[in-house]
Amino acid sequence: MGPETVLREMGVLDSFQTFVLILGLILGRMIPILTMNPFLGGQVMPANLKIGFSILVAILVYQPITAGMTHGVPQETLPYVALLIKEIIFGTALGFISSLVFYGVQSAGRILDQARGASMAQMLAPQTGGQVSQFGELKFQFSIVLFFLLNGHHFFLRAIFMSFESVPLESIPRFLQMSSSAIHLMAWTSGQVFTIGLLLAAPAVVAIFLTDLVFGVLNRVAPQINVFFLSMPVKMMLGIVIILFVLGFLAQQMRDHFVQMLRDVYGVISMFRG
């Protein structure tokens, strides 16, 4: 059974060459999203799974894509390479925007561990392949679990599927006209990483600061007491207790940031739609 016969059994009436070209463009969009997005596997996701998932997406969206095409995928090398570069840039932009909120949550854990004196304890984050602090990894994994519990992955995947309709494979956006708004959006979302980290770490950091203030006053009253070593276990335990008390608040804040992230994803799709 040849490839043309297999495609006809799948309901694909295009030639095998056209199918491969369209599949290549879909892979160019999907693989950067899967690689950069922590809740879809990130760097820990094997390459064969990334390609397999991208092929599954290609099968699901192939008929709507080909039905909406007006010009078709070019067979020439240079026009096709230009479309492939556009797809890689588009997929990278979507993956970058959607991953920043999780890095913001992770930075909140880093700030907290820095405040309570536990920043030296490092562990590996599988999705990013980098070393993070204990609370950084805890909040990072908690944000991924919460994102799935809130069905955020459904809205994100819906946006990805919608992007194939809003930004067709055969179209090239006007990069010069969208460059200003794209740079503004990327800069704003990148700055939000630090803002998210500060807001989520603020309750515990403020409590630890007040603890340091109390021990500083104690040191002035009784200089012979070694408050540095006395405060370390207190700040360690206080950070954990405060996080447990404000866990509901953190979950609410993360939910709001997830909603903003999805809005930014739709904003990127609108920019590439031109």
Image (cartoon, rainbow, N blue to C red):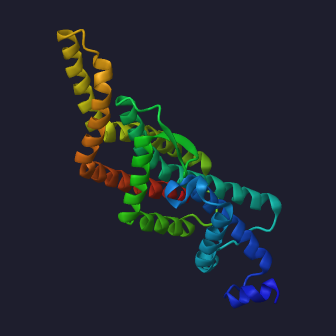
Percent x, y of residue 41: 55, 59
Q: Could you say which quadrant of the image residue 62 lies in?
A: bottom right
Residue at the image position 22 percent from the left and 46 percent from the top: 245
125 or 222: nearer the viewer: 222
**Residue 225 location, x and y as percent?**
25, 14
- Residue 80 is situated, as x and y percent measured from the top left of the image, at 76, 62
Decide if residue 38 is on the left or right side of residue 220.
Answer: right
Query: From what the image shows, is residue 134 above or below residue 7?
Result: above
Would you say 217 lies left or right of 21 here?
left
- Which quadrant does the C terminus fall into? bottom right
Residue 202 appears in the figure: no
> Which image quadrant: the N terminus?
bottom right
Q: Residue furthest left?
A: 221
Residue 68 in the image: above or below residue 148:
below
Q: Against 116, is 184 above or below? A: below
* Vertical order, 149 against 232 (above or below): below
- The count of marks equals 0
> Residue 239, position in %: x, y?
30, 37
**Of residues 62 and 182, which is closer to you in this image?**
62
Identify the residue shown where x is 22% and y is 26%: 210
- In the rendered image, is residue 226 in sight? yes
Q: Nearer the viewer, residue 198 or 132?
A: 132
186 on left or right of 220: right
On the rendered structure, is 130 left or right of 239?
right
Tell me what residue is drawn at x 49 percent, y 58 percent: 39
